[in-house]
Image (cartoon, rainbow, N blue to C red):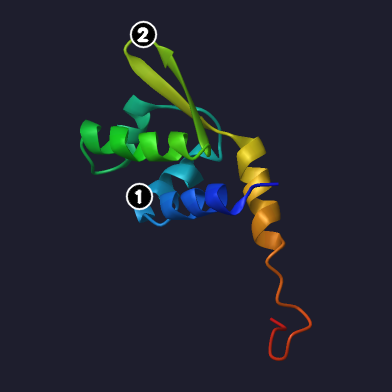
Amino acid sequence: MLNEMDAAAICKALGDSNRLQIMKRLSTGEICACKLLEQFRITQPTLSHHMKVLCECGLVTARKEGKWSHYSLNRKTLCSFGKFVASLSCCGEEGGDL
C-alpha cells in the first residue's frame, strides 16, 4: 500500500482537470503524445509538464518511440492508490453513512 507522502503526490497530480482528463483517456490504453495533443487545446510544452507530473508520482509510464513518447497508466500504482483511498473509511461514525 502507498504511504501518505506518495498518496499526497498523487492527489496533487490529480488536482488538475487536464491531468484527470488525460488519465481518463489513458484508461483505454497506451496513447502517443501526438494523439493527446490532438485531443486537448494545450501546447506541447504544457502537455510535457502534465505528463512529467503524472510520471513523477507513478501514475503514468512513458516509453520513447522515435521522437514521440507513448504513455500508459501504471495500473499497479493506480490500484495501490485506490486501496489507500478505500482505507479512509468513515463508516460507523455518526453521520458517516453515505
Judging from the image, what secondary structure is the residue with disc 2 in? loop
Q: Residue furthest right?
A: 92
| Quarter of the image where one finds residue 46 | top left
| Total residue callouts | 2
Residue at the spot 48% in from the left edge and 40% down from the top edge: 57
Q: Earlier in the sequence, mark 1 or mark 2?
A: 1
* Dot label at residue 2: none
Q: Nearer the viewer, residue 27 or 7?
A: 7
- Disc 2 packing (10 Å; few <14; some 14–19; many ≥20): few
- Disc 1 packing (10 Å; few <14; some 14–19; many ≥20): some
Q: Nearer the viewer, residue 41 or 48?
A: 48
Residue 40 position, x and y percent, is 30, 42
Q: Residue furthest bottom?
A: 94
Residue 88 position, x and y percent, is 68, 66
Residue at the spot 35% in from the left edge and 49% down from the top edge: 18
Question: Is 3 above or below relative to 72?
Answer: below
Question: Is 69 above or below relative to 80?
Answer: above
Residue at mark 1 to residue at mark 2: CA–CA distance: 25 Å
* Dot label at residue 66: 2
Circle 1: residue type: Asn
Quarter of the picture containing the C terminus is bottom right
Question: Is 88 above or below relative to 65?
Answer: below
Q: Is residue 49 left or right of residue 75?
A: left
> What residue is pinned by disc 1?
18
Question: Is 14 above or below relative to 62?
Answer: below
Circle 2: residue type: Gly
Residue 32 position, x and y percent, is 41, 25
Residue at the spot 45% in from the left edge and 52% down from the top edge: 14
Judging from the image, what secondary structure is the residue with disc 1 in? helix
